[in-house]
Amino acid sequence: MSEKIIQSFTYCELEKRRPGFAILPIGSFEQHGHHLPMTTDTLIAGIVAKYIGNEYDGLVLPPIPISCSQEHNGFFGSLWISASTLSHIVRDIVEALNFNGIRALVIVNGHGGNYVLGNIVQELNLSKPTIMLLPTKYHWQAAFKAAGIEKTPSEDMHAGEFETSVLMHEFPETLRKEQIADHDAPLRPWLQVHGMKEYTDTGTIGFPSLASASKGELVLKEVTRLVGSDIKRFLEEI
């Protein structure tokens, strides 16, 4: 995994720092069209987590690199774990953080198929708010607009303008630019039944031809700014 998304420190350095909260990026290992790597969601979740950690002094944990990607079955190499396994992993990490006196966790989810994360957050927050999913869809919508990303998150579902822009800015060496091709599939009512293969042969749903490194830079900076008030309120309630 890139050094850009994993902080390097010793336990004594971390103990001296005593971070007030932790940030857990959750990615995936699944196809991202012909032009982006299988680790795209992990790279993006990790870099968003690092931006947030740097800005608000959080402990950025190593990303969870495989999650609930069952809808990508049929595309060679895509891997997944069950929702219950992901739930157990997150709960175990929360328990370990609590043991170390870190009571607050922000999850940065890089994969849209991880629906179970919303339920985990609801359950763990029953007695007291200690865990939060950020950025929310509202943060992303506003960040898309500010960065000049032309398509909505729904239109730009997978390997499109947003993801390609972020990798152009942060990880340009991972792109196969000559393989970029747009694919529009605005209605996907059977996605949970038949998966991505029902709507795309290439694996892309979106418009990567609209991507640019400048959009990638702007969307990362803007989404980091937008989550600030939520993180401040969250930490005040811990």
Image (cartoon, rainbow, N blue to C red):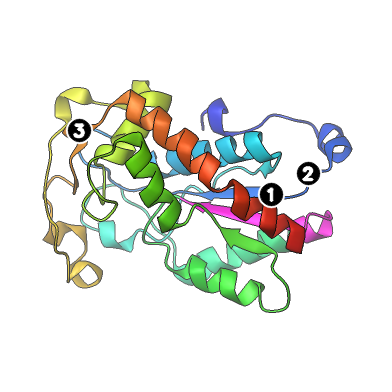
Q: Residue at x 26, y 52 (%)?
A: 157
Position in image of residue 112 (x %, y %): 37, 58
Q: Is residue 38 visible in the rendered structure shown here?
A: no
Q: Is residue 24 visible in the rendered structure shown here?
A: yes
Kindly report which numbered mark, 2 or 3, lies closer to the viewer in this rendering. Answer: 3
Q: Residues within 10 Å of mark 3 (few under 14, many from 20)?
A: some
Query: Who comes first in sequence, dot 3 or dot 1?
Result: 1
Amino acid found under the numbered disc labelled 2:
Pro
Residue lying furthest top: 173
Query: Between marks 1 and 2, how big is the CA–CA gap?
Result: 7 Å
Q: Residues within 10 Å of mark 1 (few under 14, many from 20)?
A: many
Q: Quadrant of residue 147?
A: top left
Q: Nearer the viewer, residue 217 or 39?
A: 217
Q: Pointers 2 and 3 in contact (CB under 8 A)? A: no
Q: Pointers 1 and 2 in contact (CB under 8 A)? A: yes
Magenta segment = 97-109
Secondary structure state at the residue bearing disc 3: helix
Secondary structure state at the residue bearing disc 1: strand
Position in image of residue 121 (x %, y %): 58, 69
Q: Quadrant of residue 170?
A: top left
Q: Which residue is mark 3?
A: 210
Q: Which residue is mark 2?
A: 19
Left/right placement of residue 2 relative to residue 194 reads right
Q: Which mark is residue 22?
A: 1
Q: Residue at x 53, y 40 (%)?
A: 224
Amino acid found under the numbered disc labelled 1:
Ala
Height in image: 140 above or below 48? below
